Amino acid sequence: MAGAMLDVVIDDSAVGKALEELIRRLGDLSPPFNDIAEYLHQSTDDRFRQKVAPDGSPWAPLSAVTLARKKGTSILREKGTLQDTLRHQVTSTELAFGTDRPYGAVHQFGQKKGASGSAKGRPIPWGDIPARPYLGLSSDDETEVMHIIHDYLSQPVTG
């Protein structure tokens, strides 16, 4: 995905340690990763409705210029295209969740005026775009991911 993506790394956190145990037991993580991806879709959709970042902080309000140009006042929801492009890819060892739209990264991380251009090569004329993070794990998300992993770890090993 070329836009913005949530990258979960197996580290020494509780989630990382639980994922390591899951790898040891299952080998193929695609079943729990698919469940986690479905949860991430729901959680991210909730953030769009609430207009908040994963840490619960509200998104920056729209500027007066943007309000004058837009139809409506909803942040990141003019047509719903960004939210509708959220996808996931799962393999036996990896879960990627995000959007392939370049403007998804602009909204996730922000962008300074003139940092990107139009198809004609000229800088885009509007001002700075503040970061409005929508991808990431909240503490509630981490708890739910741990529950999903625990459900798989508590299943009897078959073979």
Image (cartoon, helix red, strand yellow):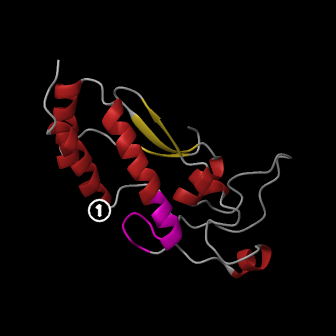
- Where is residue 126, by image quadrant? bottom right
In the visual, does 75 lie left or right of 64? left
Nearest the eye: 141 or 13:
141
Q: Where residue 18 sits: x, y (%)?
A: 18, 41
Quadrant, the N terminus: top right
Which residue occupies the extreme top position in the image? 159
Q: Does residue 111 lie above or below 5 as drawn? A: below
For the point 70% across and 69% down, the residue is 127
Quadrant, the C terminus: top left
Nearest the eye: 130 or 93:
93
Q: Where residue 47 sits: x, y (%)?
A: 47, 65
For mark 1, give the secondary structure: helix
Nearest the eye: 65 or 141:
141
Q: Give the number of callouts.
A: 1
Q: Which residues are magenta?
A: 44-57
Tell me if I can see residue 142 in this picture. yes
Is disc 1 surrounded by few (<14), some (14 to 19) or many (20+) residues within 10 Å?
A: few
Tell me if I can see residue 51 in this picture. no
Q: Where residue 56 sits: x, y (%)?
A: 38, 71
Residue 54 on the magenta segment: yes
For the point 63% across and 74% down, the residue is 74
For the point 22% across and 46% down, the residue is 15
Nearest the eye: 150 or 125:
150
Instruction: Name the residue tied to disc 1.
Output: 140
Which residue occupies the extreme bottom position in the image? 64
In the visual, does 145 lie left or right of 87? left
Question: Amino acid under label 1?
Answer: Asp
- Where is residue 95, by image quadrant? top left
- Where is residue 149, by image quadrant? top left
Residue 17 on the magenta segment: no
